[in-house]
Image (tube, rainbow, N blue to C red):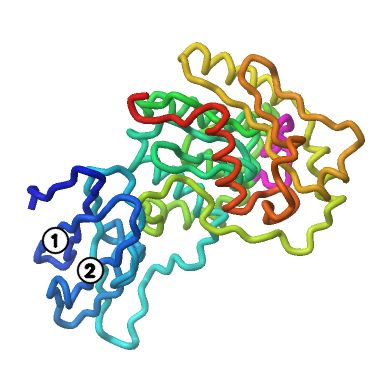
Amino acid sequence: MGDIELTNGFYGIRFNSNDGRNLVKIVRFKYGVHTALPTIVDDFGWERSGYVFVGWSVAKQGVIAYRDGSLACRGTVPGRIFDVYAIWNPDDPSYKPLVNYSHISPYWAEPIYKVEGMKYVGTEVQELCLGSSHAHYGYYAEDNCYNLGDPSCDAYYSFEILKYWVPKLTKLRRIVYFYDIFTPGNVIDRGSEGFRRICWLHFYRMCPQLADCRQDTTILESYTDCEEVFYRSVDMHMATVPIGYRGNAIKRKPMPNVDLAKRVAMHLKLNQGDCDRYVSEMIDYCRDRKLELIIVVPPLRSDYVRELPQGFKLQPPQGARIINYMDSGLFVDDDFIDCDHLTEDGAKKLTRLLHEEVGEVRPNA
């Protein structure tokens, strides 16, 4: 069982019967190639009396990540073996699973995925992306990179997340930080999406940035609604995240009926505060640890730019390399899914341009 050859760009998936018999099959897959998973009956001959196989999970009691015969996603690291577990339901038409995860919004689930995904690939990460939704949608992580951008994240929380992960990422060499239109503001503590603090309170035990919020019980006002999701996340163990997940946006949908003028006005209103001091601290922190820091000013769609005040500029603190795509002319409207977020192709384009300018982080480079 342990003699499978995983060199030359191969990884393995260990299929566990998860039915009390402890049957195991390890199958080799080519890294970067989508290949159909084996079928549990035809290929493995596994059956369970009184039960029906419903799919594979990455946790023994997790939710279904792959159906029978679905495509295997990219392996995170050649040479590694990943476990999946057969999920069996009673062969009874009236049976309904006690737990149904299908209603969990990706808006809540993706922060969970990002944290869980890092547990699987963190030892290989050399380039880490941080920032708000512009990082989440604007950077496309592959190979030894990871995207920890999180919607509406400001500089304070990005810096706290960075400090949490740096000691755990032994191969980390570069930070890519997206400095976007509302980064300088106190977005989480003062904005309309303050409920997202619960994600970081839950996963990282972070306190709010602003002193007047730290004793404010309303920071937990949404916890009742989200409590069930977080408790489930303890058991999910990345259950719905594809093998090889690197933090990239799973679903991209344009914002419906967006009032562009109101959106720009909201961003500019949030573009206030003292978060730039956290960017400056991030610069010093990276310099002290000999980590390369690249600050990216992301592009905006042309209609968004026209709504900005004449002569508006984003000016990140000095001390790190700054790459400004806002006025670069390198992006067209078709690169955007909405007025300020990139499509997947747009994200790949930005990441390619970034790596052409600063160089890709390569193993042993």
Residue 307 on image: x %, y %: 88, 45
Q: Residue 25 bears which disc, if any?
A: 1
Q: Residues within 10 Å of mark 1 (few under 14, many from 20)?
A: few
| Residue under numbered circle 2 | 38
Camera-nearest residue between 232 and 24: 24
Outermost residue on the top side: it is 288
Q: Which comes before the other along the chain, label 2 or label 1?
A: 1
Quadrant holding the C terminus: top left
Image vertical order of residue 107 relative to residue 116, above or below: below
Outermost residue on the right side: it is 310
Viewer can see residue 218: no
Residue 222 on image: x %, y %: 61, 51
Viewed as shown, does residue 180 lie left or right of 140? right
- Please report the residue visible at 66 percent of the width from the left and 37 percent of the height from the top: 216
Residue 88 occupies quadrant: bottom left
Task: Give the SS element for disc 2.
Answer: loop
Amino acid bearing label 1: Lys
Please provide the residue range marked out in magenta: 181-194
Magenta: main secondary structure = loop
Viewed as shown, does residue 26 lie left or right of 287? left
Viewer can see residue 33: yes
- Please report the residue visible at 67 percent of the width from the left and 39 percent of the height from the top: 188
Q: Residue 161 bears which disc, if any?
A: none
For discs 2 and 1, the disc positioned in front in the rendered view:
2
Residue 141 on image: x %, y %: 48, 42
Camera-nearest residue between 21 and 351: 351
Amino acid bearing label 2: Pro
Residue 298 occupies quadrant: top right
